[in-house]
Amino acid sequence: MRSRFIRICSLLLVLATVLTVVGCAGGNEDTTADGTQEVTVTDTEPVTEALTDDDTSVTAAPDTSAEPDTEPDTDPDTVTDAAPIDDTTDADTVTEEETTVTEEETTAPETTTVPETTTVPETTTVPETTAPVTTAHVHSFSAWKVTKPATCTEKGSEERRCGGCNEIEIRTINATGHKSVTDAAVEATCTKDGKTAGSHCSVCGTVLTAQKTVKAKGHCYNGSWIVTKAASVSENGEEARACSVCGEKVTRTLTYSGEKTATPLVLGSSALGGGRVVIYGSTEPNSSIRTVVGDSVSINRSKDKYFYIEIGAGDSTPVQLFATAPGKAESDAAEVTVSSAGGQGSVWGGRDSRLFYMPTLNFLTGERADSNIRSNINQLVSYITNKTINDIQKVTGKNTKLLYVIIPDPATGYYQEHFPYVQDYVQDPSTSLMEAFMSAINGKHKDVYGIDLMPTMRAHKDEFIYFSTDTHYTELGAYYAYLEIMKTVKKDYPDARVRTVENGDYTIEYKDVPGGDMCGMAGLGMNEIVPFFVANFADTGSYYVSKRNDGIKSAGFGPGGWARNSSISGSNPTAYFLGDSYGCYILPFIGANFSKVWTNNGVLWNYSLEKSILAQNKPDYVILLVCQRNVGSNFMGNVLASFSMSVSGF
């Protein structure tokens, strides 16, 4: 037992030595935040315990990392010079001492600080840095769902939800704004009111631009009374005339006066080729002419006091003509013998003293708007709306408008007046090249217009809108064409002033003048009654006019580089005008109603746009006006195309 006690004491001595060595060998003392100290052992040499029989001898400290020997040592040889033990010693005391030593032996490892200073469990931060990191929730939203639809004027809203956490997102939908739809203008007629153009929203129906009422115009009768039924001894007759605007006819009764109509005067005849002959002469104004050739009878009207009647004839054919003037009995017969030998094929006759230029009949019998021609038309229209107008506006630096005006030839304007042998070849007058072009170009670009004059010319066909002896329209026909142009202009310039006969700006005078170009073609030495316009305003002196051989001033073929200012205020736009021979009759109206007008050098038949005129003058309109016969089937090689493509060098 004593040996065991000595071993314990030796161990305690070794531990005390180790602690002393540690303190002297460079251990660092740190004070913690709570005031306690923490010892960190560094560079400590291992200590080895060596026990000998001499219980007071210590050679080295034990390794502090080794476990203390807790096994009881029963070897008696390890103790020397021991005093004899009294067997009578109090057993309880010994037992208590032994027990106490045992407790110290077993608790010694707990009281030593070596394990704590070597592992330093309190100061390590590993548990904090290695703690698990929480991952953020990623939303998984559904598609947006409209909760309040937007209207034209009010905002709406829509939302979406996360499928994981049910979170909701809400956002605003902007108001859609009105979707404007044009309410087309309704032109006033002679008897019914019209409306101006307007607009409304196609979604909610809100009126955006209100339409205004345009009062009915009332009938306009400029034509002469025409006998539709001759009066006789036993029965009254009737004569009629039509409104120049809507064509509505009014009639009046003719009473028999008891006198005969004067016998018509035959002035001559001319072979037209193909067994056709035209007889021309004079009679009382507005007479009906009954022509008898063998068993064949036809009734035509004179044009004022002249008549031009085509008949079928042989080498030597006798003909009788009877005239009936309004309110009078039929005249005695005028007799003439005609021959169809020789002649030419450039002129054709028609009903009611009308002559036609043969090449223009191709528009009715030959050149139709078939699929190939329509393809060419569409190709040209595409060029105009994508190239021509853009180039013009680039030079002028403004939204210059482009107007295509095609004047119907009398052959189509008066197709109802052709004789059956011509009408038999007419399949569908509505499919003419002119009308196909107008249909294709309108509505393709906001600054490009095609003005279809066919309805206007047909509405006024009973007036003197075309010469009977010439291939052109008269000043009256040009006047109606000019009014249609100004209707288009007023869409862009509502305040533009339009000079009219009804307003007293013009007076129409009818003159008896020599016949026109078809007289020369057919060898006809005849005259014709023609309407002329007299302007009743101050700037008439600046009109472009030429003197006919009868001394009457009329539009004609004049000098180049023509330009003029109008007395109309600046509310009217300016124009750059190009045209063919039909332009000479309309130019006085254009010049008087646009505030300023420019033309190319030579005025007529020069269809190329001049960059200098566009750049210097910056016109509001560029107007191309040509007659129908200049619109051929080759739409990529005619006047319309050459004009449209003349800007390619810009």
Image (cartoon, rainbow, N blue to C red):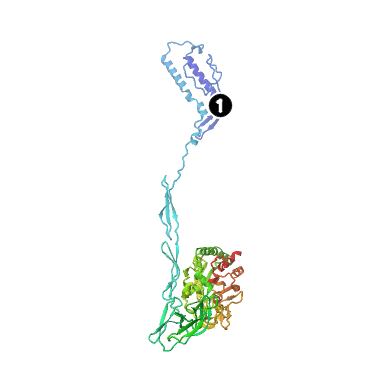
Q: Residue at x 51, y 29 (%)?
A: 119
Task: Please indicate, yes or no, whether residue 554 appears anywhere in the rendered image.
Answer: yes
Residue extending furthest toward the front: 315
Q: Amino acid at mark 1?
A: Gly
Disc 1 on helix, strand or loop?
helix
In the rendered image of this protein, does residue 213 appear above or below residue 231?
A: above
Residue 219: which quarter of the image?
bottom left
Of the pair 336 and 160, the residue shown nearer to us? 336
In the rendered image, residue 507, in percent from the top left (x then y), is placed at 51, 82
Quadrant containing the C terminus is bottom right
Q: Nearer the viewer, residue 530 or 46?
A: 530
Q: Nearer the viewer, residue 46 or 53?
A: 46
**How would you rate the neighbour count of disc 1 (Cα within 10 Å): few for under 14, some for 14-19, many for 20 or more?**
some
101 sits to left or right of 523: left
Q: Nearer the viewer, residue 532 or 199?
A: 532
Residue 125 vertical placement versus 650 (above, below): above
x%, y% of residue 281? 51, 83
Residue 287, position as x, y percentages in the image: 46, 83
How many numbered marks, from 0 up?
Answer: 1
Q: Residue furthest left?
A: 234
Residue 385 placement (x, y as % from top left): 53, 64
Residue labelled with disc 1? 23
Q: Is residue 505 visible?
A: no
